[in-house]
Each structure stands twice: as C-alpha cells, then as structure tokens.
Amino acid sequence: METMFGIAVDGVAYGMILFIISVGLSVTLGLMRVVNLAHGAFAMVGGYVASYAAQSFGLPYAAALLVAVLLTVLATLPLEKLLYRRIYGHANELSQVLLTIGLTFVIVASVNYLFGPSLKRIPLPDLLLGTVSLGPKSIPTHRAFVIAAGAVTLLGLWWLLERTDFGIRLRAAVDDPAMAAALGIRTERLYMATFALGTGLAALGGVLGAELLPLEPYYAIRYIVLFLAVVAVGGAGSIFGSAAAALALGITDTAGKYLIPNFGEFFFYAALILILFRWPHGFFKGKMA
Amino acid sequence: MTTTLRKALLGAVFAASLGVGAADAATIKVGVIAPFSGPFAMFGQTFKEGIAIYQAEHGKTVGGDTVEFVFRDLDQANPAQSKALAQELIVKERVSFLAGFTFTPDAMAVAPLIDEANIPAVIFNAATSAITEKSPRYVRTSFTLWQNTVPLANHIAKLGVKKAITAVSDYGPGIDGETAFKATFEKAGGAVVDTIRMPLKSNDFAPFMQRIKDSGAEAVYAFLPAGPTTLAFAKAFTDNGLKEKGIQFFGPGDITQEPDLPALGDAVLGMTTSFHYSQAHESAANKSFLAKYKELFGSSDNATFTSVGAYDGVHLIYTMIAKTGGKIDGLKAVEAVKGMSWESPRGPVTIDPDSRHIRQTVYLRTVERVNGKLQNTEKASFADQPDFGYKVGK
C-alpha cells in the first residue's frame, strides 16, 4: 500500500514537471498550428539565462526566473517577426519542421560556444531545499513547488483562453484567420502575443524543470521527443489534455521503472503507442481547454 | 584566365607535395579519434588539453622527429565511422599511431586496421576490459570498471556492510561494474539483494530510489557515465531521504568528475567514490600538471581523468618513438613500453606486460568543500591495482 502511494506521488510529481515543460509547445503547436521543434531550445535559453543571472549577478531565484522568462520572450519576438510569421498555417508543415530544427541547431551551437559543454545549474533558494512529507512518503520541496506551479499554470491558461476576450479572439483567429481579420481582429498582433506566451512558458518550464532535466547545450535535442510525446497524447492545443497526458505518462513511467526496472523506457513508449492507437488525435482533440 | 588558374593550382600542388616530402622524414603523426563536437565534446576538449600540456612541457620533437597530432571528430559512439576515420588517418595521413577513443565500440572497431597496418593504438578513455584482448597493439592509459570496483567492493565489505544493492546504467561498462561488484562483494561474504539496471536515457530517478529504499540494503553501488544524468541521480539520492535512512552511497568516481562538481553542488557532499585520479591528489607531479593547465588554459577547473588519460597516453607515445628510433613497428613499439613505470599526475603507474592496461593506485575519495570549492579528497589508497576484468571468464 505504502509502495503504491509512493509510486502515485512520484508519478504525479514527474508528470507535473513534464506538463510544465511541455505546455508551451501545446500552445504553439495546438493554437498556432506551428510544429515548433525549437521549443526545447527556447526552454534551454530560459534555463541558461536564469543560471547566468543567478550565478553571475547573484539574483535570487524568483528574480532570475522572471528575468529568464522576460529575456527569452524579448529575444524570440524578432524571430517571430522575421521567421515564424512566414510559416504559419497548415500548408507549411514541412517548412515549419525545417526552419525550427535548423533554428535548434543554431541555438545549440551558440550555447555550446558561449557557455561550453559542461552542466549548468540554477541555485535553489533555501526555501525550496529539503523535503516535505506527505504521510509516509517524502518528496523534495522543489517538486512540491513545481506541482503547485503546474496547477497554477493550468488554471491560469484555462482562464486566459476560455474566459477572456483575448482567448475568444485567438480561437477565432485560429479557426478562420480571414474571417477574423475581416471582423477587425488584428490577427498579426494576436499571433505575436500567443507566440510570446508559448516561448514564455517554454522558458518557465526550462527553469523550473532544470532539477530534473539538467541544462547542457544538447538539452534542446535530447528532450524534444519527450515534449512532443506529451503534446501528441494530450491532443494539440488542449491545456487539460496536456496535463492529463503528462500525468498518465509520468505515472506509467514511474510505476514501470519501480516494478520492472530492467524494462527501461518500455512502459513509457508502450503507453504512448496504446493511447495513440485508441485516441489517434490525443485525449482532448478539438476542445480548447 | 583558365591557364593562369591551372598554373597556380599546379604550382600549389607541386609545392605541397614537396613540402610533405621534405617533412616526411622528420614528422611522426598521431591520429586522435574522439568527440570534439556534440554532447560528449568534453572528452575531446580534455584530450586536447592533456596533449597540449604534455607538448608544452616536453617539446614537440623526440630525437629530432617532430610529433604532430591530427584530430578527427567522432561525435558519438559509432564503430563504423570510427573505422572509416581510422582508415583515412592510416592511408591518407600516414599516421604512425592511433589514439583517443572515448567509447568501447569505437576502440574495438579499429582492431583489424591497427593489426594490418601494424601500428599501436593508445586508448585514452574507453573502459571495458575486453578491448585490449582484441589486438596485441592496444595500450590503455585510462581505467576499467573492474579496476575501480574491486577495491571498492572489498572496502565496503570490510566496513561491515552485509547487504548491498547495485544500480548501474544499462550498457557495457555499467554491466562490467555490476558483475565486478557482485563477484567481489559476494566473495567477501556480503549479499547483493538486487541488481537494478537503469536505462541510459532516464530522467527521473525517484522510482529507482524507492526501490533501493524498499530493498533493505545498507549500501548502494551505483555507476552512471559522467554527464547530465549523474546530476539528476545524485539529487534524487539526497532528495528521496536515502541518506537519512542510513543507506550509504558508493560508486566509481565518474559520478563526481571535476567538471561536473560545481553543477552537482551540495547534493554530492560526503559521497564516497573510488577512482584513479582526483584534481586534489597531493603530489609534485599533479601540482606541476595543474599549474601548466592553468598557464595554458586560464583555469585548471576542467582537469579530470580524461585529461590525465591523454597526458599519460602522450607520454607512452613519446617513449615508443624514442625507443624505436622513429621507425614505428607496432608490435615492437608496444613491446618497448611493456612493464614501463613512471610517476603520473594521478600517482605511480605501470603498463601491465600481459593486459597492456595501466596498473595504478585506486583511491577512495570523499567529496568535500575546501576553500569554497568542491573536490574529491583522497582518504585511502589501494596501490598497484591491475585490470581485474582482463580475460575474466576465459
């Protein structure tokens, strides 16, 4: 019983971390229909900015997090204007893949050149060190914090997309850009804002997830399959879908590794195949949140 | 226009061939195959640094012959590509030595080539015991998992630990470590309650930690290759309360190698590992090695076992050239360094005449913070350890 509880707690914690680093991709891929393979690279840039800000300027964790999100958004906005704007829409899927994978390589090489191949860390504040106990099971405080941050992000995004004018316009612009523009919605600005939201979330995930997915130049390529798996299972564009997918994959993976460690990643990919077999478009395809 | 161009080209080719011809008599080339780009670039970088330090200390000539290093990038384990690069180096560059090799399959793949060309291959890293069995022309200056694990397992048994568990990355060296630990620990009277093999690509180690916790073991032997996963593993170990439960952590020193220490931080404080090189090794040879490191590269923070592996490898190559008078015959050159002993930055070492692997002192180290910097402080040493895995099970 205690073991089951342990697996459940660890699984949820891992799932929430997966959610927080993948949800930005769900926004760009699902809402903007851009296969943004550079998502991992943006997350990595966020992580490196936070690491640099905290280690070289001694900024506290919260400030480093904020600086990382803001700087990543500011740095990627010109990319939206110069590059991404040209590849929006379903007809451009191949160009999207080529452009974003190319961008990833450029970012990987630049980070490698600037910061070197060694691991970078983001020092945690004392508040997030140590463990908290949940009944018989103790989990790291940092993970508890990530779970809470994931829940807040989930609710915040749901509110933004479902309950605000911005969300209504965005959904209109995605469904029928021409009609939305004819009705006076400034789709270009809207897309830019959504792109900023996506990269901001990527940076947030990069910083918060750094304890589990350590920062090094190949981060961008190493974990992209993980992000894509979560979004594919959840259904692109569905925030609740991503959360459900991340939790399902996290719990399956944790249980598999605990019970039969020699099977390795088998359970993660088996779950992925079975879920996609049953729901080829993911858990919540077509529903906004 | 065309004729001018052709003349220029012809001239260039002629000059180049003359240049090569003139240099041929006095240049001995060493082909180094290692990752210089990609996720494992740290290996190539430290190899290059080790070579540069040796050349800065001992000059670039041996008995009038210039030694030149030719680098070839192999960004990940890829035996076919390793073989192709080796062939190119032997045929086109006419190298007299091959060196480098980070991964076991890459090193093994060149065995038929070095035999056919009759040149020595000096391995700076690849650590599976079986490699040197594949050709009499291999010499190795790194370590093997067996070499570092056997003294550690005996030490753990002596501490009075009865029940241990192993957790290793599921690939060649990891399985070598597991086998070595199990064989030695059980012979010393202990019991291995469970052997966990973790996928190389694991991100989350919490489930493995739970399993270790539930196994009732008093100590864990863990091996992961140096790199990003060690960070998550070490953190998981502290974060999941294994330390508080009194479970002791042991493993080969890859997990706390110097370039990773700043990132690992306090999570690895107090961890005990066994390894052949520590930056904190107290000796005149290591001091001058680190001083040169700092002089050439601004900081000696990255000095680690791979830099020393390359440094000692170059020492072997220089000795082979000196002893064979610049005419390289692979077997004779290897013969010339068999049984050779010297003082390396890591401590006293000898080339074992049988296994052609380096015999060395294996140290028991604990991670400590000294003057604000984390280091592997040597606590005990086991002198003259051979490769216990050579021809094991044959």
Image (tube, grey):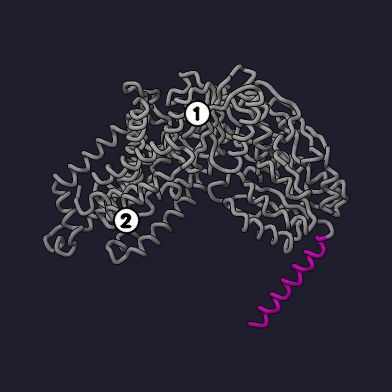
Furthest toward the left, the residue is A183
Residue at position x 86%, y 46% in the image = B322
Residue A197 left/right relative to A97: left
The residue at which mark 1 appears reads as: B265
Of the residues shown, which amino acid type is indicated by label 2?
Answer: Glu
Secondary structure of residue under mark 1 = helix
Furthest toward the top, the residue is B160
Tell me the chief SS of the magenta region.
Answer: helix
The answer for which chain carries disc 2 is A
Q: Are marks 1 and 2 on the same chain?
A: no
Expressed as whole percent of the image width and height from the top left, the position of residue B101 reads 66, 48
What range is drawn magenta here?
Answer: B1-24
Residue at position x 18%, y 44% in the image = A160
Expressed as whole percent of the image width and height from the top left, the position of residue A243 reads 27, 42
**Viewport quadrant of the N terminus of chain A:** top left
- Occupied quadrant, residue B389: top right
Does the magenta-highlighted stretch encompass residue B385?
Answer: no
Task: Tell me: residue A270, above or below residue B27.
Answer: above
Does the magenta-highlighted stretch encompass residue B7?
Answer: yes
Secondary structure of residue under mark 2 = helix
| Any part of residue A107 in sight | yes
> Where residue B114 is drawn, which disc sits there?
none
Q: What is the tally of numbered marks visible in this picture?
A: 2
